[in-house]
Amino acid sequence: MRRAALLVCLCSGLWAGESARSLDAQPGTTPRVDGILSPGEWDDATTFAGMEGWTSQFSPVRDAKDLSLRGWVKHDGRKLCFAFEVGDDVLYGIDTPRWLPDNNPKAHDPTREGFPWFGDEIEILMNPAHRWKGEEGAAGDGSSWQMVVNLTKSRLGGVGQGGLLEGEPRSDPKAWATYRRWIETGAMEAAARVRPGGKGYVIEWAIHFDPCLEVEPGRFYTPALGDRAMGLNIAVGDLDEKEKGAGNFGNFHHEEWFAGLRGRVTRLRYWGTLWMRAAGRPVISRP
């Protein structure tokens, strides 16, 4: 019966974005957000991988030794939880100097003039309200948002300590204030840690349903609402030596996206779908 219901959902065309790419967040145990993939901690999560089939905003990835990704997603009834293990042959600010882009010497400033995503990083973009009007991006509140976890800087730890940073639209003071409040109050929690031996890093990220997954004004997701489709995109940013990104914005080497069209990856309508599952189903590995 559960399998039949899933097939009905998949065939109905009910997506939270126009991309057919999707993941399931099923109920599971609560992970410890410490940047360590402890044995068994993510065994009950849906797994996924990149970069094959993802959208390249800049130079495409041609070798998994250059950049690769394994990911996990689940929820514990109160929080949506992600883990990412990134393989990366050169870590910005660790294996390289902390060079700055020519178009923004304030890239590391902890203000709206900075580039929170400048560095090796993961971004999560969500549209819990499952709506858009045209070509707009995230509103910067619980209905739709874009946040950053950077490997070598953070709101709480400053430059040198990885963690959460405010995302887009950073030009909007209201969105910036909302994101900062989520970080400072623990509505979002994240940890970023270099893998033992280097050549990559781990990010664990927990997102509280209230206030971050607002499905209707003033109403936040709970399993009592049943299965729910939400818009989702994920970005993996990769800086290496400055010359490797020549010709790309900010000299980024790679920026790979789970879904969307090149140049339109931050627009709600082109995202994939995260299915919040109210009850457990067999875990399905996704490409």
Image (cartoon, rainbow, N blue to C red):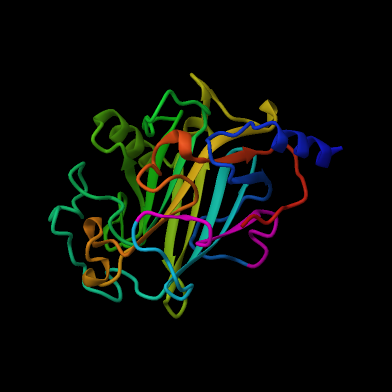
Residue under the image location 25 percent in, 59 percent down: 248
- In the image: residue 58, left or right of residue 66: left
Which residue is more in the foreground, 160 or 215? 215
Q: Position of residue 116 (x, y in %)?
A: 28, 50
Quarter of the image containing the N terminus? top right
Q: Position of residue 237 (x, y in %)?
A: 37, 58
Whether residue 53 appears in magenta in the rendering, the answer is yes
- The residue furthest bottom is 197
Residue stretch rendered in magenta on the structure:
39-57
Residue under the image location 47 percent in, 38 percent down: 270
Q: In which quarter of the view is residue 14 placed? A: top right
Residue under the image location 61 percent in, 57 percent down: 287
- The residue furthest right is 1
- In the image: residue 136, left or right of residue 85: left
Q: Is residue 16 visible?
A: yes
Q: Is residue 75 visible?
A: no
Which residue is more in the foreground, 222 or 274? 274
